[in-house]
Structures are given as structure tokens and as C-alpha cells.
Image: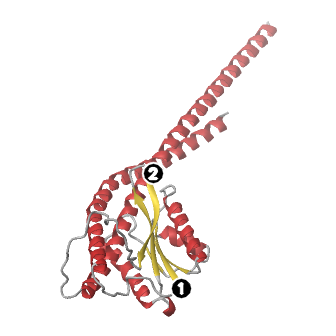
């Protein structure tokens, strides 16, 4: 009985230590979510308005630009996948990777070669373990991205896009990220960023009709200046959305782990108490039995 009690006590101590870690992770994630949400809210209007400005220039002018319009032949499609540098975030990383693989399968069905760029150690580890080549890997900033990080990634993929698929670059660019919907809901999404699609439509654009712009010095030069900022803004917003989603997913996963640890500690405590009671009962039985045997022996000697 004593050995069984020691086993229960060791398990309680081990689970209690784990609970402290998960609780700390939960508190850290909770503290970071608020700041991450504020950054998402601050960046979204800029990303939305620069998208409208680029759309207005492209719609109201005949300017030609290598980042606008379909190419005659689409050979290679790039996927920028945003994952986390750390685990303990539930299904956050697996959901983003699954979305990227579904997109890759669709692109291959269209006859395109898939080129992968990965942000975050978890995504990079997933592909390296499977021996899949990566065109670019960035890490170390998934939970707190800065604009410079987005610019670094954007510069690399824009350079490959401008080369084109026939010269070893890419012809399309898709971004797979995780959209922060609420504290309880985060959704992995895929969006095509390049090339920009110009569609003829009688429906008013999202956010209302475009303002009447005058382009100086020319629409083409305005596009040259705006489009790189557009790509960087879209990518930065995706990084911020993913960071907020990562913190929310980690908080939820760590809270669940902490609650499970508390339940397990209660169960183990009950088992330890039962083992201790059984041990005490056995000790009392042995004492009583010994006393009765001694009393019988004394009575026989008289």
C-alpha cells in the first residue's frame, strides 16, 4: 500500500508542476491578446484603403504594370504560409497547414508547380520533416510581427514574381493565414494577392464608389509606388491577424490543459486518500491482530 501511495503522490506532484506551466502560458497569452487585437484594428483600415486606392488606379486608367493582370501562361504558383514559432496552440498550426495543402492540391490540379514560402518554425519543420523544398523561410516574429518583417518577406516574393515562372520565379502569389474572428473563433484562409484581378462589374465596389482621383505624375508611376506598399500592407495585416489568432488559440488550449490538470489532480488525490485509508485500516488490523494474539498467548501461559 505504501508503494502505491508514493506513486500517486509522485503523479500529483508531476501534474501540479505541469499545471503551473500551462497556467502561466494561459496568463501570458491572455495578456498579449489585447495588444494583438489593437494592432489588428489599427492596421486593417490602412490595408483596406490602400487596396481601394490601388483598385481605383487600376480601374480608372489604362496603365500597364507587371503586378496587374493575368499572364499568358501560369507555370508556377507561390504559397506564403503563416504559422507559429511555438506550439501549445491547439489546432492553430495544423489548420493553417491543412489549408495550404488543400490550396496546393488545387493548384497542382490546374497544372501549376507549387513554390512554398513559410513563416514560422512549425510550418518549416512540417515540410522539412517530409523532405519538401522551401523557397524561403522566416521565423522569430510570429507572435509579435513588425512591418519590417512583412516588408522583408514581400520584397522576396515580389522579386520572384517580377522574374516570372519561365525564369525561375513565380506567376501567382497566394497567402495562407489565420483570420481572427473572435476569441473563440479563428479561421484559416487563403487569398490570392498577385496578380491583381481587374473585373468588369456593374456592382458598386466594397466600401462605396471610388473617389475621383487625379494621377500625378502618371497612373503608371502611381502604381509603381503604390503596389509594393499594397503587398506589404496586405501581408502585414495577415501577420497581425495570425498573431492574434495564435495568442487566442494558445490561451484556449492552455486553459483546457489547466482545467484537465485540475481534474486529474482531484482524481489522483481521491485515489491517494483511498490508498492512505486502506493503509491505515491495514495497520490497525495488524495491531489489533497482534494484540489479540498476545492476549491469547498470555491467557494460555496462565
- Residue density around tag 2, few if under 14, some if 14–19, many if 20 or more, within 10 Å: some
Label 1's element? loop
Residue 22 drawn at (x, y percent)? 46, 50
Q: Is residue 172 above or below residue 271?
A: below
Question: What's the residue at 63%, 31% (across, down)?
Answer: 275
- Residue density around tag 1, few if under 14, some if 14–19, many if 20 or more, within 10 Å: some
The mark closer to the camera, 1 or 2, is 1
| Left/right of residue 42 with respect to residue 97 in the rendered view | left
If the image is split into quadrants, where does the C terminus sit? top right
Residue 301 drawn at (x, y percent)? 80, 10
Q: Nearer the viewer, residue 6 or 58?
A: 58
Q: Is residue 132 above or below residue 48?
A: below
Question: What's the residue at 51%, 69% (across, down)?
Answer: 123
* Sequence-first disc among 1 and 2: 2
Q: Is residue 236 above or below residue 156?
A: above
Return the residue at label 2. 21
Q: Residue furthest right?
A: 300
Tag of residue 113: none
Compute the Cα span from label 1 to label 2.
48 Å
Q: Residue furthest bottom?
A: 167
Q: Nearer the viewer, residue 54 or 46?
A: 54
Return the residue at label 1. 75
Question: What's the residue at 56%, 69% (across, down)?
Answer: 101
Please indicate, yes or no, whether residue 227 appears anywhere in the rendered image.
yes
Amino acid at each position: 500500500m505504501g508503494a502505491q501511495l508514493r506513486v500517486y503522490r509522485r503523479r500529483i506532484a508531476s501534474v501540479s508542476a505541469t499545471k503551473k506551466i500551462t497556467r502561466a502560458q494561459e496568463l501570458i497569452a491572455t495578456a498579449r491578446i489585447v495588444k494583438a487585437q489593437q494592432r489588428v484594428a489599427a492596421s486593417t483600415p490602412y490595408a483596406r484603403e490602400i487596396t481601394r486606392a490601388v483598385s481605383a488606379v487600376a480601374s480608372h486608367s489604362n496603365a500597364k504594370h507587371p503586378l496587374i493582370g493575368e499572364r499568358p501562361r501560369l507555370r508556377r504558383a507561390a504559397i506564403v504560409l503563416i504559422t507559429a514559432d511555438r506550439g501549445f496552440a491547439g489546432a492553430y498550426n495544423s489548420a493553417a497547414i491543412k489549408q495550404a495543402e488543400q490550396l496546393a492540391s488545387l493548384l497542382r490540379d490546374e497544372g501549376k508547380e507549387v513554390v512554398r514560402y513559410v513563416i514560422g518554425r512549425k510550418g518549416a519543420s512540417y515540410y522539412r520533416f517530409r523532405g519538401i523544398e522551401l523557397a524561403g523561410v522566416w521565423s522569430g516574429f510570429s507572435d509579435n510581427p513588425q512591418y519590417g518583417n512583412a516588408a522583408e518577406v514581400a520584397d522576396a516574393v515580389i522579386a520572384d514574381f517580377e522574374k516570372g515562372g519561365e525564369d525561375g520565379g513565380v506567376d501567382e502569389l497566394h497567402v495562407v493565414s489565420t483570420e481572427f474572428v473572435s476569441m473563440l473563433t479563428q479561421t484559416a484562409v487563403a487569398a490570392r494577392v498577385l496578380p491583381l484581378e481587374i473585373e468588369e462589374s456593374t456592382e458598386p465596389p466594397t466600401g462605396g464608389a471610388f473617389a475621383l482621383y487625379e494621377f500625378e505624375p502618371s497612373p503608371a508611376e502611381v502604381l509603381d509606388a503604390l503596389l509594393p506598399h499594397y503587398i506589404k500592407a496586405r501581408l502585414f495585416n495577415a501577420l497581425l491577424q495570425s498573431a492574434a489568432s495564435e495568442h487566442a488559440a494558445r490561451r484556449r488550449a492552455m486553459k483546457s490543459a489547466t482545467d484537465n490538470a485540475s481534474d486529474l489532480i482531484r482524481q489522483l488525490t481521491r485515489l491517494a486518500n483511498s490508498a492512505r485509508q486502506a493503509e491505515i485500516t491495514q495497520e490497525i488490523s495488524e495491531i489489533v491482530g497482534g494484540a489479540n494474539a498476545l492476549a491469547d498467548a498470555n491467557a494460555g501461559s496462565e
